[in-house]
Amino acid sequence: MKKEDRLLRVGVLGCGPIAQFAHFEACRRARNAELYAICDRAADLVERMAVLHSPKATYTDYAAMLADPQVEAVVIATADAFHVPLTKQAIAAGKHVLVEKPMGVTVEECAELAALVKAGGLTLQVGYMKRFDPGLEFVHDFAQKGLGQRLAFKSCYHDSVYRYTMTDNLQVIPMASPQALRPEGNPKADKRRYFMLTHGSHLVDTARYLGGEIERVNARLVERFGAYCWYIAVDFADGSLGHLDLIVAVRGDWREDFQLEAEHGNAAGKIYLPWFHKTSEVEVFSTKDGLYRRPLGEDAHTYKRQMEGFADTILTDAPQRGANVDDGAEGVRILVAISQSVERGEPVRLADVTGGLA
Ligand SMILES: NC(=O)c1ccc[n+]([C@@H]2O[C@H](COP(=O)([O-])OP(=O)(O)OC[C@H]3O[C@@H](n4cnc5c(N)ncnc54)[C@H](O)[C@@H]3O)[C@@H](O)[C@H]2O)c1
């Protein structure tokens, strides 16, 4: 792996599954970052991960890692409920933050964090790694430049009952610890809430990334044979229409795709399970030259590329390509709006939303 001279010194908080599957490797593979430190309350995990990944420093106390002047940025790879408090602690210590999605769990905590980040001048990026899928980047850029007014955006995210069969073959075998720190209760017990936070967050961010700002949602949910299906009608702020659907889980293959219709052309794509590290197969058509375009996207390690983008923003002042604090806050606001729309059986305007998921 070719490394640049100046590497962002990153401390990863959390040695749980996502750090083991993605973040340790992402720091090690990134051309412009190094896995400087790792931290987890579970000492056994820290010890085992240190043997595998050789960070320069290890911690079981987050405050101690934040006090290390060599640590320039942290990755927060912990349970959702901890994201905002731990991010605030990092910002207070002067560290840049890459926080896993969703950025938080309530509208208010996200708004508070946004104010803090903007006042501080540090970089905050949310772990919506699909923004670093070369296919989706291509469609995003093309839609900004060459498609004119949008008319409609449609996308689906269908988790598969066979997902773990597939991912078990793609991911490293995770190591668990009884000492791991988890929020009170079981965040996975309320499935509506858990699925929306875990999967809905990606669906919504991709819709904003490709379709633009969302103003209002009207969501319906049906639960049958252990499957959950949300059909969400979306009003985009530019007046275009949208439809998003989330199913957890279909009795078939994983399916994630989108279609965008616009004034001067259209775009469509199929997004793969991220652990294949395979770019989305996208195609855009422009009426300006009558041509279809299809990028190869040979490097589609989205977790590595999101770390590279994060480090570029900090080290070179490159424009932030990843989701910023406003994107993080808006993503949570939409999830809350969807859940409230389902509860009330009526459309919900984002501007009226407060609190957390119903
Ligand atoms: N982007 C993606 O594709 C993707 C995929 C999976 C999970 N995630 C997100 O990643 C996050 C973490 O998921 P996970 O399954 O790895 O979580 P987890 O709860 O299983 O593991 C988190 C680890 O962090 C440690 N920890 C928590 N708070 C700590 C503290 N204050 N000090 C020290 N250690 C602390 C815990 O001990 C635990 O080992 C979630 O928000 C999830 O939504 C993202």
Image (cartoon, grey):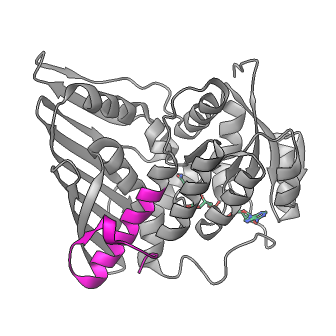
Q: Is residue 222 magenta?
A: no
Secondary structure predominantly adopted by residues drawn in magenta = helix
Measuring from the top left, give residue 48's x and y in whole percent: 85, 53
Judge by depth and name the residue closer to the eye, 330 or 179. 330
Measuring from the top left, give residue 288's x and y in whole percent: 12, 18
Q: Is residue 223 visible?
A: no
**Residue drawn at (29%, 71%) of the image:** 229
Judge by depth and name the residue closer to the eye, 278 or 57. 57
- Displayed-image quarter of ligand 1: bottom right
Judge by depth and name the residue closer to the eye, 28 or 184. 184
Q: Quadrant of residue 95?
A: top right
Measuring from the top left, give residue 22's x and y in whole percent: 63, 46
Q: Is residue 347 magenta?
A: yes
Above or below, 224 against 145 in this view is below
Say left or right for 228 vs 169. left
Above or below, 117 against 55 in this view is below
Extent of the magenta region? 329-358
Say left or right for 128 vs 41. left
Say left or right for 345 vs 59. left
Above or below, 16 against 211 in this view is below
